Structures are given as structure tokens and as C-alpha cells.
Image (cartoon, rainbow, N blue to C red):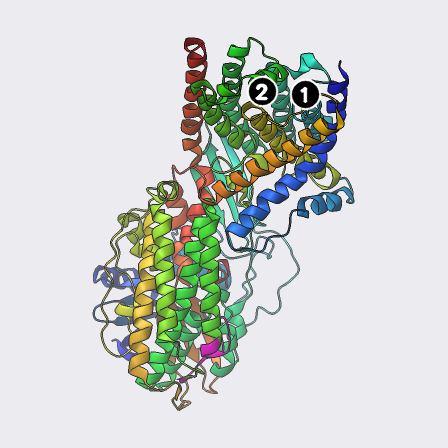
Amino acid sequence: MSTPVGERRTARTITPEELPGLAEALLGQGFRVALVAGHDDTDRLRAVYLFTAPRPDRRVELHVPLDRDHPHVPSLAGLSFAAGRFEREMRDLFGIVADDHPLPRRLVRHFHWPAGWYPMLADAGDPPGFGDVDGPYPFRTVEGPGVFEIPVGPVHAGMIGPGHFRFSVVGETILNLKARLWFVHRGLEKLFHGRTPERGVELAERISGDTSVGHTLAFCLAVEDARGDAVSAATQRIRGVLLELERLYNHVTDLGALCNDVGHGILNVHAQRVRERLLRINDEVTGHRLLRGAIRPGGARVRALPDPTALAAVGADMAEIATLALDHSVVRDRFTGTAPLTREQAADLGTLGYVARACGLTVDARHDHPFLPGESNRVEHAHTDGDVLSRFLVRAEEITTSIAMIAALADAIGGPTAESASSGGAGRSGVGIVEGWRGTIVHRVEIAADGTLSRVKVADPSFFNWPALPVALADTIVPDFPLVNKSFNLSYAGNDL
Amino acid sequence: MTLLGLIGGVIQPVLIVGGAPLLVGVLRQVRARLEGRVGPGVLQPWRDLRKLVGKEAITPRGTSELFRVAPLVLVATTLVVAVVAPFVTTASAADPVADLFAVVALLALGTAVLALAAIDTGTAFGGMGASREMTILALVEPTLLVAIFALSVPVGSTSLAAIVSSTLNDPARVVSPVSLLAAVALVVVIVAETGRLPVDNPATHLELTMVHEAMTLEYAGPDLALVELASAMRLTVFLGLFANLFAPWGIATSAAPLALLVGVLALVVKIAVLGALLAAAEVFLAKLRLFRVPELLAGSFLLSLLAVSASFFLA
């Protein structure tokens, strides 16, 4: 039945009819939908469902071969919200239809792509000219006395990604928010096709600019899983250090930006100062301020390990900034109780990362799917009310933990560089799971017989967390939206590949 | 109209138009230095205005004359206040207009016209900014009137020039409970009227949180320059009025050149100091949740009411 195919991973080929029953059984055993990906195997299509579970780390794949002329699968949207979103993505990119989907509307496809054109199919070719639009896609209209709509974006005042937000409000209170993203489709997954894994790294580093370590590491772990490469413990620890360095500089930026969004600019200035110090440390460690170029399939190379005293100073600085922010009565008032996401909502939507942890969920791939040798202690967060304050505090606490982790990992490594040889095996699939700074990143790769990548599927935590933003914003006031949006700080580029 | 009033009527508008962008520059520079930044220098607002004036005038499609007239009205109303109110001299160029109610009405007219222009654009942001500004205006205007009224009760006149002259003759009045209560109320009013922290954040780029800035989003080029200039002038006028109501020393009471020179210098110093204090205070403040702003304004209204009551009981 199930055959082991990779690290702690089994795969099973099933018919579409078997899918809902098996998925329900897996979800019942504590698995979550990590990703759903379409594949074009030339003679037929194939849908792959990857389920993962923590404690112990388990990964189960269900492969559903599909007829090219009639690619239909039963929808799992009723079982898992995230699966329903992946199904819409798969339909837009491959034309694989999930039957009885409760929301059978396009998700990722561009409004002007011609109907019936599926970019991920092998014979799709270059994007055709903008043609017949794929039917109207109206916003839900909220009616009633005093209700009006505020359209915002996709071009914003700040330097953030493009997203269109449609607020339906009464006075200042948000009744309904629809976030329409998907303005930055770059066809990334298709760009991987035909590249060697070594040449795929440069793409993985650029999936989301602020998560280059997270995505590169997930990609490399997946490639190593597929090739059956063994990587030394020292290499993995160096990768662990880089992952935490990335978490540090991003969390520091976010804490400052949250203070700035409530008009307390002085703390943002200081957070920016700390961030610059961290970027320079990154530069010393890897030769790149955003930590690119250090992680490769089978290896990791750094120039030096970060100086623990410098990082401890950063930690003390940030602890002071966080204390100053929360001791300010107005800042605290703006954070407390703003846009709460309940634990139940967070679990139902399948949220990941600090968004989930601020609601009391314990999802953290560093513990659920560890790539580092040895056990590390899970952090207990003091504030898990799911509001902006909790998301602020979870970040502040993670900064402290990350600095401690870097010190412990650096101690265990000893020397600065470590290399492992690549065995260059081919013809298999691999999965890499990494806790990036935003949350759990999952990559699944398939390597063809000639050693090139035949399919790479990327699942960024933003894909799971975006739907939580409108849920948390119900009954929040419009002027608090930028603050709440920043407290989630979701990626546009990671979401729309 | 006296000679002194006439001279004041010429010097004051020149001084306020020329100095208002510099005041904004001082505020930004003080804030930058306190935050550890270098800052662009106090001349930057003037450079920005020069740049904007040199641009092509464009207006959004579908807007009416109101949109085009609003910046002019905004500048004009503030300019009238700059001419008549006692800034450099105690005598006014047009004494009947230097009345408490007339001055407050003129300033409110500018705000109201800008709000109408914002609605005229038909954009969601304009409407949102206008609605917020009107909410704040409705809460601020009574406080402004009542607070200055409290100062006018002992004088027995609502003429601003008379209030200022009377304070000059009786300096002890400045430390009376009436004066102190009114001063605190007026500080809140000025902060709210000029869109400073904690009511509004003039430095933000976040459209959804804006109040004053949301109303001016559709303006560009020379029109935007006028709107920016008018905002700076309003800030200057408010700070100047505040300074002369509570510390009128130095203001020219005769047309002697030395007295006028002292009057000009005193005004510049007072406004610069107040502006620097305002900027320094902003470093320590954060923006209030929008629904908490009425609480702050209600508090200031209460203080102004107490000031009026006290002015009757202590008289």
C-alpha cells in the first residue's frame, strides 16, 4: 500500500474516489494539509496531496493520477480550508477541477488570462495576449443604511507589494473586507523546470526577498531528500544559524514598524538602527546582507560565525525597545485587543508561524519537523490572545530565543565552514520543511532521470495566513487596518508565485 | 484704522507667509534631531513648495470649481487672520474682524471648504478624511470659542486686540486659574486643528489612518503647494495667537521702528519656541485610536468650560 519514499515520508497512489476517505482519516490523526500540487506527466495529469504531522514527524503523500481529458478530483474543501485554497490554485494553473467546491472561483489566475489557458501545463507555451476575461468576479456587496465601500490599492503609498483591499464599512467599523491579491504571478514554479538543483538555488533565494534563507533551505532539504544525500550535523547547524539570523532581522523590522504605525516613530528609528547592525552582521557572516549565497544543496558555507556578544547587545537593545513600547500607555492601548483572531479561527484556517503562535497554537516546524540534530525546547509564549499585542510579544520573545539558539548552535559547530559532498542521485521526489521567520515553509521537488528539476511546488506560510487577516479584522475600525496588516506582515510574493 | 494697525496689517501677513514653511521645517528638524536623524534642514518645506509651484496644474476628472477654489479660500481665510489678529502689533488693520468669533469662524471656514473639496473628488479617501475632519472640527470649535471667551470675560470685549492689550497692562492675569485652564484647553485645540500627534500623524504614509492628509490626496502641483502653505500658515497663526494670548510681551504698542522690530523678533522667537516644544513633545507621543480622540477633545472642552465658569466666579 504505502511505500516509503523519503525522509519519514510515505507515498501512496490512489484513485480519486478513495481521496476523501483517506484524507479524512489522516486529518483525524492530527495531520495537516501541507501542500497540494498539480503535475503534468505528459500522458496524464497527477495531483499530489502532502499531509504532515508533528510528534513524531510524519509525512504522507497521496498521488492521484488523472485523465488528461477529464481531470476531476473530489474536493477536500469541506475537510480542510487550506486544501480548498490549494484546489482553486490547482484549477487555475493545471485545469484540474475539484468537484463540488464551495467556492469555485479563480484564485491565482490573472483576470485577463484567456479562459481555458493553464500556464503550468507542459504544452501551455508563452502567455497569450490578454483575451476573453474569465467571467465577472464581483465583490460581495454589503447593503444597508450607511454602508459604503472603500477600495484601496493595488498600488499603495508604502513600499509594499500590490494587493487590492475592498472594505465595506459603516462609519469607521469594518463589516467585511475582501483582499484580492495575485497581482505578482511570476511563474516561478515553472522557471524551476529543467534547471539543475544547483541552478534552482538562485530562484529559491528570490521567491520572497525577505525569506531567502527560509526558502533556500526548504528547497535544499527537499533536493537532498530526493537525492538521498546525507548532510553533516555541522552543516545543518550552520543552516540553523542562518535561519535564525533571518528571523532576527525581520522580527526587529516588524517591531519597529508596528511602533511606527501607531505614530511612535522614535522606536522605529531605533529598531532601524538595530536592523542595520544585524544586516552588517549578516554581511560579515555570508557576504550578503540578506544572507544569500550561503546555502546550497548538500552544503552551507559561511565566512565567519556571528559574534555572540554583538548579538547579545542586539537582544538587549530590542528588549529595551519592546519594553519602552509597551510601557507607553497609548501604544499599549492601540495594540491591546486590536483585531483578535481566536484560537479556533486560527486552527480552522490552518494558520502558521507567529500568527498561529500568538493565538495559542504550537505549530513550529523547528520542533514539529526538525532538520537539526538534537531536541530543543519549545518556547511557551506568555500572551496568546491573538491580538496585535500578542503578535508583537511573540516576535519579541522569539528574538530572545533566536539569539540563544544561535549561540548554542555556534558553540556546537566549532569551526566556521563545513561542506558535504553531493551524491547526485536522481529520479525521486523530496520534501523540505523549514520554519521560516513567517512560518512553516514547505517545498516539494521532483527530480527527473537526468538530474534536473521536473517540478517544484512551493508553499509559503502567507498562502495559509492571508485568509486570517479579514477574519481578524471584522469589527475593527478602518484606521487600525495598517497596524493589523503589519502585525500579520504577510508576503505578496511568497503567496503568489 | 491707526498707523500702527496699518503697519501690522502689512508686516504680519508677510512674516507669516514667509515664516510658516520655516516653522514646519523647524518642527521636522527638531523631531529628526531628537530621533537621532540628520534631518533635511529647515528650508526643505520652502524647497518643496518651489518644486510644487513649478509643476503643471492638474485636477482629477469630474471635480467641480469647488475643488479648484478650495486652496485659494484656505489660504485667503488664513491670510485675513494673519492681517487682522494681534501678532506683531496690538492695533488691528481691521478692528471689527479681529474679533474672537470672526477669527474662529474664518479658520473654520477654511477647514470646511477643504472638507467639501475632499468630498468633491468623489474618492473614498477624500470622503473618509472629510468625515473624520468634520467630527474633530465639531468637537474642537466649541472648545476654541469657549476657551478664548473665558479670556475675554475679564476684559469685557471679544476683540482679540483688546484681550492682548489688557493682558499687557495686567500681567498677573496670566497665572490666574482662568488663564491656565484656558491655556491647556487651547493646546489640545491647536494640536487637533493643525493635525498633529496624538490626534493625527502628519508624517504618515498610511492612507487609511489619515485625517487632514486624506483630504489633500488628490491635490497636485501649485494647488497642493497652496494647501501645504495654508496648513503651515494655520499652524503659525494658531501658535502666534496662543503665544500672544498668554504671553503678549514684546508686541508693538507704538509705530516706532524699534518697537516694531522688537514686536517682529518677539513673535518669531515665541512661535519658534512653541513649535520646537510641540515637536519635542511629539517624539514622546503616539497616535490615539480614532475613537479615543473625542474623549481627549471632550476633556479639553470641559477645561474650557471650567475656565469660563472660573472667569465669572473669580471676577
| Residue A281: percent from left, percent from top | 45, 73
Q: Identify residue type, mark 2.
A: Leu
- Confirm or deny contact between disc 1 and disc 2 (CB under 8 A): yes
Quarter of image, res A218: bottom left
Which chain is home to disc 2?
Answer: B
| Quadrant position of residue A368 | bottom left
Q: Is residue A418 left or right of residue B275?
A: left
Q: Secondary structure at mark 2?
A: helix
Query: Which residue in the protein does label 1 denote?
Result: B253
Q: Quarter of the image containing the N terminus of chain A?
A: bottom left
For residue A148: magenta? no
What whole-number distance in Å separates the C-alpha atoms at marks 1 and 2? 10 Å
Q: From this view, report whether residue A203 is shown above or below residue B52.
A: below
Look at the numbered disc 1 and give the secondary structure of its residue.
loop
Residue denoted by label 2:
B168
User: Which is nearer the eye, B251 or B202?
Assistant: B251
Q: Chain of mark 1?
A: B
Label 1 crowd bin: few (<14), some (14–19), many (20+), radius 10 Å: some
Q: Does the rendering let one see residue A217?
A: yes
The question of residue A287 being in magenta is answered with yes
Number of marks in picture: 2
Give the mark nearest the N terminus, 1 or 2: 2
Residue type at tag 1: Thr
Q: Which residue occupies the foreground of this view, B212 or B306? A: B306
Q: Nearer the viewer, residue A96 or B34?
A: B34
- Characterize the magenta stretch by its predominant secondary structure: loop
Considering depth in this image, is B314 or B17 the residue closer to the camera? B314
In which quarter of the view is residue A5 placed? Answer: bottom left
> Residue B138 location, x and y as percent?
51, 21
Q: Is residue B266 left or right of residue A255?
A: right
Q: Residues within 10 Å of mark 2 (few under 14, many from 20)?
A: many
User: Magenta span covers which residues?
Assistant: A284-299
